[in-house]
Amino acid sequence: MGMPSRADCESLDARDPLGRVAAEFAAGEPGWLYFDANSIGAMPRAAQGALARIAEEWRRLRRRGWKDSDWLDAPVRLGNKLAPILGAEPGSVVVCDSTSINIYKAVRMALALRPGRKTVVAEAGAFPTDLYVAEAAAPVLKRTDSLAGAIDDSTAAVLVTHTDYRSSYRYDLAALTRAAHERGALVVCDASHSAGAVEVGLAASGADFGVGCGYKYLCGGPGAPAWLYVAPRHQSAAPVIPGWMGHADPMAMSPDYKPAPGAKRHLAGTPPVAGNALMEAALDVWRDIDPAAAFAKHAALSDLLIRLVEYQCPDLSLASPRDPARRGGFVSFRHRDAAAFADALEGAKVVASYRAPDVVRFGLSPLYHRYADIWALGERLRQLETVRMQ
Amino acid sequence: MGMPSRADCESLDARDPLGRVAAEFAAGEPGWLYFDANSIGAMPRAAQGALARIAEEWRRLRRRGWKDSDWLDAPVRLGNKLAPILGAEPGSVVVCDSTSINIYKAVRMALALRPGRKTVVAEAGAFPTDLYVAEAAAPVLKRTDSLAGAIDDSTAAVLVTHTDYRSSYRYDLAALTRAAHERGALVVCDASHSAGAVEVGLAASGADFGVGCGYKYLCGGPGAPAWLYVAPRHQSAAPVIPGWMGHADPMAMSPDYKPAPGAKRHLAGTPPVAGNALMEAALDVWRDIDPAAAFAKHAALSDLLIRLVEYQCPDLSLASPRDPARRGGFVSFRHRDAAAFADALEGAKVVASYRAPDVVRFGLSPLYHRYADIWALGERLRQLETVRMQ
């Protein structure tokens, strides 16, 4: 396999069964290349209509929107649209709150399900906010460099950042879950940097709880509502924060809490109607998409980027796994002066992101990136190298 | 004082210094009268522009929106815009999460600040979700019919629904707080049915924590972000759910949690950008409004409604306090067949709400309701009575 050509990329686009999907997203600023799917995914064109509909319903229906529109059951409806993308069972996902809040709920639920065990194990290099929340939620947080090796009989739960936010290393969730379950521990998986880009496989892995944000590869918009997965066998657990939206009959205003069946009981407060409308517009893009096909395309786009960089950019070295099965939603490269290189990228109208100390990340979307976009990125990276070498 | 006339109402509108404010809100459906400010407040006209701006920034800036726009500090900025409406100190309010989540945080914080005390006291008739959350958050929840009488040396916190959701009875927050503090207990006040309509007076009352929703009288839209008040003397308390948005430097990605100064540390996850934009459009309506003038107008509108009903509608009896200082955002009336009467109201194109077993509620906004609107409501109520008597 030689250096891919522009024609190769165009040919891949022409044959791409998902090639039509890019047209469902709004274009960014002319001349800019956006590789920040790992941060804020692109805006689906339908988002504008979704906002207009919510504004019109707010103006016209007001409180009647809770019964005459579809606001009230959005957390469950959106969860069911999201479930196949996460490889989750129907009815096991709700869209709600923020990732931080959902981590808190999942960790406290895991502790309640393992009475007598007081420790949560997490990677020392986990996404920092996951550690902050776990430290507050658990009596003991054990930070480790080796998750599987740190699990013992005091471990209530393992909190795993499914895809590392610097290297894009993606855990083998099934293997980790087996190791945890063998010691009687539960698994809480933060799949923020995986969901919508690569396989998470919540049901197949046997993971107990999952959380993630809605604004990266899922394209739900900045600060989109997050999601919470509760494996079916744990769904009857007592909710940690039992608000009225998780009540069997919220509008009965009963003084006593009676949880709704299924994952719905893990909802608390009133759903954010505008945020959910944007999130639903994004999930509806997946309507006719086989998630496996999207994940295969994501792997191919990522492989292409790696090849283009390795042929053309000697200053960049791959910081992510070469095996697509171990890679998350973005590809990162090391650079000896990564912060300055990230600035140069912005000067060259490439939206990417820097993470200390030495990596630059390119977030790829299987929905809206075309092979030709990867080619164009390769060209800009090559031109930056050329300028540097003059 | 006789029965007010239509001319009296029009004259009141003509002299109303807040009369111009109604034009800042979008009209609802022609022919309908909306008295659901207690449920979903009207949409500010600026909401449309706020949504268009967010969509444009999302499309164009993507991840750069966190530094090139005003998304990131919205929770604190909006809190500061909200603080005067709540009578709160600058820097003591953040806009975030849902009311349920914020109650959980406030109750857990109060328990942490009163080690050794295990009980939270709440009214048996408090807003039900407040009870659900408190029961899960506290080792012991004591439900009582008399808040002040139930406080003892085991009480960590009193959770008070500032305005009752059926009668609109509004607690004397200062008196209740004195009673609690005398016994060493803290006060958590849910002011959802007060904020934006009547005085809450968080600072003046000495209350310790406050929470409330953004979608009722504050007009932030369905499922708007909620708010959390932390009295300055408690702001250095450890956050209950310490997510990255409460970190002193969220983007440093430090593995160790270092809380931001002030109320900001009580933020957790990524802010909901669209929801905050709508909430800010609503708070900006208050830009040139003296909250005290708004509360005085609200009392006058409520008094007018009571007089019109008592002159014309023998089937309705006042279920709310007659003293405006003890009344919250809505006025409720008892009816011997309130559910059917609520249906008849909807048939007469009046949006109000029924609460079991016997009350109908009319939520009044000091921002967008005019005295003539109250007159029009009185006319429809009278016509319903006339039809019934034929």
Image: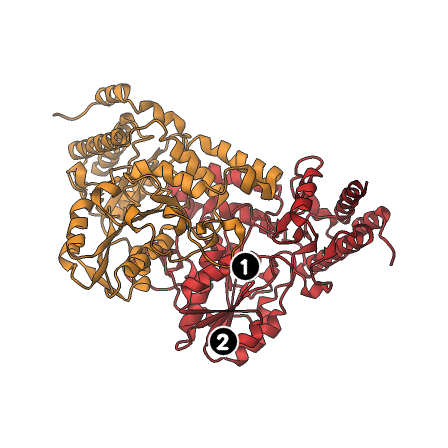
Chain colours: A orange, B red
Taking B305 as reference, is B140 above or below it?
below
Image coordinates for residue B151, horizontal then vertical, percent = 52, 76
**What's the residue at 23%, 30% (across, down)?**
A296
The image quadrant that residue B165 belongs to is bottom right
Q: Which residue is disc 2 drawn over?
A: B185
**What's the residue at 68%, 49% (across, down)?**
B337
Which quadrant of the rendered structure holds the N terminus of chain B? Answer: bottom right
Taking B307 as reference, is A260 left or right? left
Q: Can residue B49 be seen in this view?
A: no
> Whole-Å distance between the Cαs marked 2 and 1?
21 Å
Which quadrant of the rendered structure holds the C terminus of chain B? Answer: top right
Query: At numbered mark 2, what does the secondary structure look like: helix, strand or loop?
Result: loop
Give the residue furthest to the right: B2
Taking A64 as reference, is B155 above or below it?
below
The amino acid type found where label 2 is placed reads: Ala
Label annotation for residue B9: none
Image coordinates for residue B44, horizontal then vertical, percent = 62, 44
Taking B143 as reference, is A236 left or right? left
Disc on the earlier residue, 2 or 1: 1
The amino acid type found where label 1 is placed reads: Phe
Taking A307 as reference, is B245 left or right? right
Closer to us: A232 or A377: A232
**What's the residue at 30%, 51% (across, down)?**
A234
Image coordinates for residue A168, horizontal then vertical, percent = 22, 44
The image quadrant that residue B117 belongs to is bottom left
Closer to us: B241 or B334: B334
Taking B1 as reference, is B152 above or below it?
below
| Mark 2 on the same chain as mark 1 | yes
Q: Which residue is disc 1 drawn over?
A: B127
